[in-house]
Image (cartoon, rainbow, N blue to C red):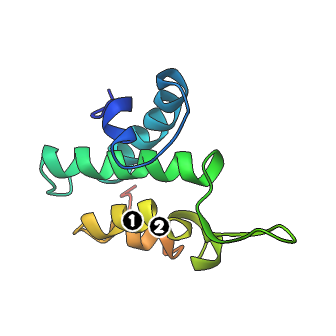
Amino acid sequence: MSRVTSSEVKEIIDTELTDSRISVFITGASKLVDNTLVGKGLDEDTLKEIERWLAAHNVAATHERQAIHEKAGPAEQRFSDIFGQGLLSTTWGQMAISLDTTGTLQDIAHHRREIKFKAVPE
């Protein structure tokens, strides 16, 4: 179940998307938090805040791309994906990474994966 509302997401990102459209991005953010951060020692308030920033990142990465340079004539526009890919591509994703003191989102952002081996006795 999601920890944040569309209104809470709109507090940190300017968007004209409807609440029902934003809820799709919240669902994705919630699943990422549930699957990667729950049980790693972060309190519910921190998980909620990370989920809010991840939802805003999801909006920014698709519908409200973050312009870092605009020019009037002849028209020119550059977007924030020059910072990196994935969570690093928006300031909202970068904030989510900084709120995660476990380093899990940092590892995801830099494509570091944890590999576990398990010995199973015969």
In this view of the protein, which residue sits in the foreground, 32 or 56?
A: 56
Residue 94 placement (x, y as % from top left): 41, 68
Contact between marks 2 and 1 (CB within 8 A): the answer is: yes
Q: Which numbered circle lies on residue 36?
A: none
Residue at 38% in and 58% down: 120
Residue 5 placement (x, y as % from top left): 33, 30
Position of 112 relative to 97 (above/below): below
In this view of the protein, which residue sits in the foreground, 54 or 44?
A: 54
Location of the N terminus (image quadrant) = top left
Residue at 24% in and 68% down: 102
Q: Which numbered circle lies on residue 108?
A: 2
Does residue 22 appear in the picture of this structure? yes
Q: Is residue 8 left or right of residue 18?
A: left
Residue at 55% in and 32% down: 17
Q: Is residue 111 left or right of residue 116?
A: right
Q: Quadrant of residue 106?
A: bottom left
The residue that label 1 is drawn on is: 105
In this view of the protein, which residue sits in the foreground, 111 or 77?
A: 77
In this view of the protein, which residue sits in the foreground, 91 or 45?
A: 91
* Three-letter amino acid code at the position of disc 1: Leu
Position of 65 relative to 31 (above/below): below
